[in-house]
Amino acid sequence: MPDTLHYARPSVLVPEQSRPRQSAGEAMPGSGVVVGTDGSYLGDRAVAWAARHACLLGDVLHVYQSTGARAGAIAHGVNQLVHEYPAMPVERHFIDAADPLEDLVEAGATARLVVVGARGRNHPGLGLGHLVRPLAARALCPVAVVKGHPDAIRGRHATVSVAIGRVTDEAPLALAVEMAARENAALRVIHAVTTSTHDDVVSWALDRATSLHPDLRVDADARRCLPHEFVAAIHDADLLVVGRGGTRGQGGTGRVTNEALFHAPCPVVVAPV
């Protein structure tokens, strides 16, 4: 396990009305928001994104970082967040290992959400960093991958999209409903029309979202295309929620999820199913 430092104001009490609920029906039933950063551009954006969502959840922010040369810059960034969110408890965890994957997977076993940037200092070009897909495939909680347009990262569109392929996609739908409600955002159900049963899928998703949160603004966007083509064309969304996908029993992430992780122009949250 990494060394842990209780940072800034760890003794701050979260107000009773904003403490995380631990009901069995929550899509994020754990405790704490975990973020991993190496001090890269997207690593910094991931920390800021995670702080905003920890504040929305009324929960603790756990910052996992390496003990390398960027430690001072990361500390400065966390200090700024402490001033921006003075009621949010923050804990810093220092990782000695070159690869933080195992530490983040272990932290995600009890967390509500794990957040990382799409790539770090060792992967400055296009594409994904080496730990993103393994983390999304193995984590027991939702994994948020911060990427895309700055307006989307900052939540300027007030819209959460969720990719629904079948009527068994309960986990990503419930997660998207919860996140949209917490951000006071609209929910957009996206569905790629590949069969004659698409009306049933869309109707189920709209009805189910409304039953989970009656006051939520919900609409649908169904197009005749392949699912992986649709997710790459998402626009005006702050967040895209997808299921893990992959072949049952073999781990990994599925084609639609991979397409979203590589090409969606906004942060992606992978539901752990």
Image: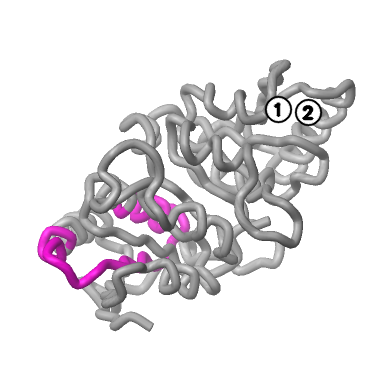
Residue at mark 2: 202
Give the residue type that dot 1 points to.
His
Q: 86 or 247: nearer the eye?
A: 247
> What segment carries the magenta color?
47-74
Q: Is residue 178 visible?
A: yes
Mark 2: secondary structure: helix
Q: Is residue 36 shown in magenta?
A: no
Q: What percent of the width, then of the height, locates residue 53?
A: 42, 52
Q: What percent of the width, then of the height, locates residue 128?
A: 40, 45
Q: What percent of the width, then of the height, locates residue 111?
A: 50, 68
- The mark that comes first in sequence, 1 or 2, is 1
Mark 2 crowdedness (10 Å alpha carbons): few <14, some 14-19, many ≥20 = many
Q: What percent of the width, then of the height, locates residue 120?
A: 29, 51
Mark 1: secondary structure: strand
| Direction from residue 157 to residue 244 in the image, left or right | right
Q: Residue at x 59, y 42 (%)?
A: 257
Q: Residue at x 41, y 58 (%)?
A: 54
Give the residue type that dot 2 points to.
Val
Location of the C terminus by quadrant is: bottom right
Q: Which mark is residue 27?
A: none
Residue at mark 1: 191
Location of the N terminus by quadrant is: bottom left
**Image position of 240 with respect to 224: above or below:** below
Q: Is residue 73 shown in magenta?
A: yes
| Quarter where residue 125 is shown | top left
Q: Is residue 31 visible?
A: no
